[in-house]
Image (tube, rainbow, N blue to C red):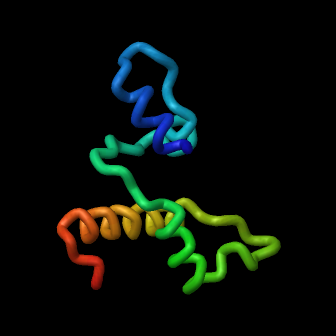
Amino acid sequence: MLVEEHLVLSKRPGLLPSRLKQLVPTVGTFYTRLPLRKAFEEYNEKHCLTKRRHITISFNEIRHILNLAQIMALSTSEGREDL
């Protein structure tokens, strides 16, 4: 949801920044649709993010999930889902 909002607002200059841009000021431009839910589920399976009670998700973990989603998007767009 945040990424889609960011995509729409980044195409219209002069509007307020997206919520994603406010949360992560250094976020760049997204050129592909990202499978964020799938990436989060895979990352969560390995690192148990949702089982934590007192430690919130860190900026680096968000970055890792975005990177994983980018790799997943690129691998499916090339017809290779075996990565």
The residue at the far front in this view is 79
- The quarter of the rendered structure image containing the N terminus is top right
Relative to residue 29, is residue 61 depicted above or below?
A: below
Side of 79 relative to 37 (left or right): left
Q: In front: 8, or 29?
A: 8
Residue drawn where x is 33% and y is 45% of the image: 30
Residue drawn where x is 66% and y is 75% of the image: 49
Side of 26 relative to 62 (left or right): left
Relative to residue 61, is residue 16 depicted above or below?
A: above
Q: In front: 82, or 46?
A: 82
The residue at the far left in this view is 78
- The quarter of the rendered structure image containing the C terminus is bottom left
Residue drawn where x is 81% and y is 73% of the image: 53
Q: Position of residue 28 (x, y in %)?
A: 34, 43
Answer with the quarter of the image where residue 12 lies: top left
Q: Position of residue 32 (x, y in %)?
A: 30, 50
Q: Position of residue 78 (x, y in %)?
A: 18, 67
